[in-house]
Amino acid sequence: MKLCAVQLASLKGDLPGNLQRHLACVEQAAALGAALVVFPELSLTGYEPGIARQVALPITSTRLDTLQAACDRLGITIAVGLPLPSLDGIRIGMPIFSPGAPRQAYTKRRLHDDELPWFTPGNQALLLTVGQHRIAPAICYESMFMAHAAAAHEHGADLYLVSVAKTAKGIHEGYAHYPEVARELGMPVLMANCVGPADTFIGAGGSAAWDSQGRLLASLDDQNEGLVILDTTAASAVAVPLAPHPA
């Protein structure tokens, strides 16, 4: 099975603009045979904690219907990033669109200290079945704790799907940690990071795939948008430039 991580420069607070760019990426991923595509943390709004409350949307919002329509038409599962409202605050969410199925969402359960003024942690694990795989989503900071991946593996996960918004320092640390996750737990890791301005930093890219022995299979650079396509059957991956956006 093929899965795709998208490396994207999101536009701050521009949901319509970001949606169009997401849809173009989904089309390209589906054309390359991907059964699932994952985007960086808070990809639909940009990683911008200061405006999260204003741009948050429930997963049932009709403004997200174009993603569901693309998912149904192409037969591809889509995992995006979006601030999600809850009864106790705004959560860092990963809405998931599956063909012909109700929408679901995973929310980040372990927040970094500088996220606490803006967000509330989630409180539920999620395992996503796509094809023969049981996939555990993880969102940025929490993915840097082995216990997060180990708990998912204990519950049956065989692939770790990581959505992040990381600086150069964060990516350097991730490149040390994610191969260790893969080796210790015997499951591939697919990671999607942003590029370009985000909050007070610059997204450092480096989106990548590691096999179940922790070998780096493919990665993107620190500046350009693109896709990493992981083929779990062949235990191989390729990095592909993002197709130009229509004028």
Image (cartoon, helix red, strand yellow):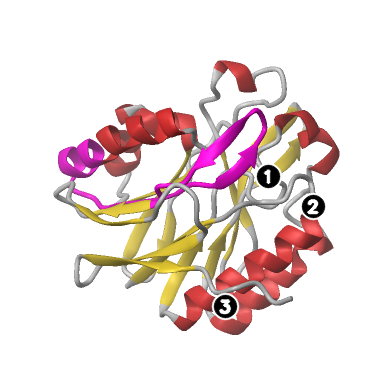
On the image, the x and y values in percent for residue 166 come to 49, 36
Q: Residue at x 49, y 33 (%)?
A: 167
The image quarter containing residue 80 is bottom right
Q: Earlier in the sequence, mark 1 or mark 2?
A: 2
Q: Earlier in the sequence, mark 3 or mark 1?
A: 3
| 226 sits left or right of 228 in the view | right
Of helix, strand and loop, which one carries label 1?
loop
The alpha-carbon separation of the residues under discs 3 and 1 comes to: 21 Å
Q: Amino acid at mark 2?
A: Asp
Front residue of 12/235: it is: 12
On the image, the x and y values in percent for residue 225 come to 52, 59
Give the residues drawn in magenta, as a range: 179-207
Q: Which mark is residue 46?
A: 1
| 206 sits left or right of 164 in the view | left
Q: Amino acid at mark 3?
A: Glu
The alpha-carbon separation of the residues under discs 1 and 2 comes to: 8 Å
Q: Residue at x 61, y 55 (%)?
A: 104
Q: Is residue 31 above or below residue 157?
A: below
Q: Is residue 212 above or below residue 176?
A: below
Q: Earlier in the sequence, mark 3 or mark 2?
A: 2
- 201 magenta-colored: yes
Q: Residue at x 70, y 35 (%)?
A: 48
Count of marks overlaid on the render: 3
The alpha-carbon separation of the residues under discs 3 and 2 comes to: 20 Å
Q: Check whether the beta carbons of the residues at disc 1 and disc 2 lie within 8 A of each other.
A: yes
The image quarter containing residue 12 is top right
The quadrant of the picture occupied by the C terminus is: bottom right
Q: Would you name the residue on which mark 2 appears?
A: 14
